[in-house]
Image: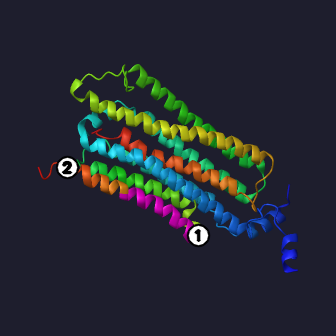
Amino acid sequence: MSSAKSVAHEAEHASEHVVGIGMYLAIFVSLMVLTAITTAVAYVDLGALNNVVMLGIAVLKATLVVLFFMHVRFNSRLTQMFALCGFVWILLLFAFTVGDVATRGILR
Amino acid sequence: MAELAAHAHHDVNVAHQFDDAEQQKESVTVGMWAFLVNEVMFFGGLFGLYIVYRFLHPTAFQHASHHLDVTLGTFNTAVLIGSSLTMALAVHAAQMSHNRFRQIFWVMATVVLGSVFLGVKVYEYYHKWVDHLIPGPNFHWPDAGEAHAVQIFYSLYFAMTGLHALHMIIGVGIMAWLMWAMWKGRFGPAYHNPVEVCGLYWHFVDIVWIFLFPLLYLIGRH
């Protein structure tokens, strides 16, 4: 086992951002609260807004996980670009799919 | 001469195709994200199918969703978020020290929570079997008019949660390998790329569930 001094020396060389335990706990509590909210809101009739709130909360939760648990907030621009690309392209797929199925029959 | 000297100081943790540890870490992270983007597309196809059929059969999907257990779904969501926290703490443990017991403890906690999730999933699947909600010859739905659409919902439910559960099972296997490597004392503040990358995989699987939970369990509850 290395001594504490050499471990600190190693850590300096790693030159990376280390997210603190406090931050992880804060993200965890936020995710739990958002889960409770999304389940509770599902029992309230908001009409079409139910889906908006539900998906908005899911996107917010996913963003917290990506930025902090997955460290993308502290990664290089290149990594951030890769992460963003995946979600942007899948949103394009969803946007055009919704554009089709949601407007069928309008012109009939 | 300079090259020779650099070689003499070569870090044992850095594979020789890389200039230094930082370049290696960057390559590993970007490579993992390239894989995860493919995974986003993989699951994305199923989410796309869900969107199409949800628009075509809105009420049948709501009625079908009613037969899923929200309490179990919420419980499992909490369990999976908890497992993401323990995974993040495993990465943190490797970043901070060579203490392999601390590293293994957090990975083990992640495996335990992942197993609880899978156990609950098996219980839910079993009840769908008992209630004749598994698509196929034994499928039964009281309202014959919407039985076809409900069967589509349950096909999507099993395909999406099944693919997700398969990722969890593979994840548990990856965690077993990780604990073995940790036991060998491979990770510490200077080198922990594999811990980080395994963590990225686990968090990704968590994100998939973050979307599956509301889309499958929570529609039309009010």
Which amino acid type corresponds to the residue marked 2 in the rendered image? Answer: Arg
Compared with B130, A107 (above or below) is: below
Compared with B174, B124 (above or below) is: above
Magenta region includes residue B218: no
Task: Specify whether residue B95 is in view.
Answer: yes
Q: Main secondary structure of the magenta part?
A: helix
Instruction: Classify 10 Å Cα crowding around label 1: few (below 14), some (14-19), many (20 and above).
Output: few
Quarter of the image holding residue A1?
Answer: bottom right
Residue A90 x/y as whole percent: 41, 56
Task: Specify whether residue A36 is in view.
Answer: no
Judging by the rendered image, the residue that carries numbered circle 2 is: A104
Residue toward you, A94 or B201:
A94
Q: Which mark is residue A76?
A: 1
Residue at horizontal 59%, vertical 62%? B30
Q: Name the chain under label 1.
A: A
Residue at horizontal 62%, vertical 57%? A21
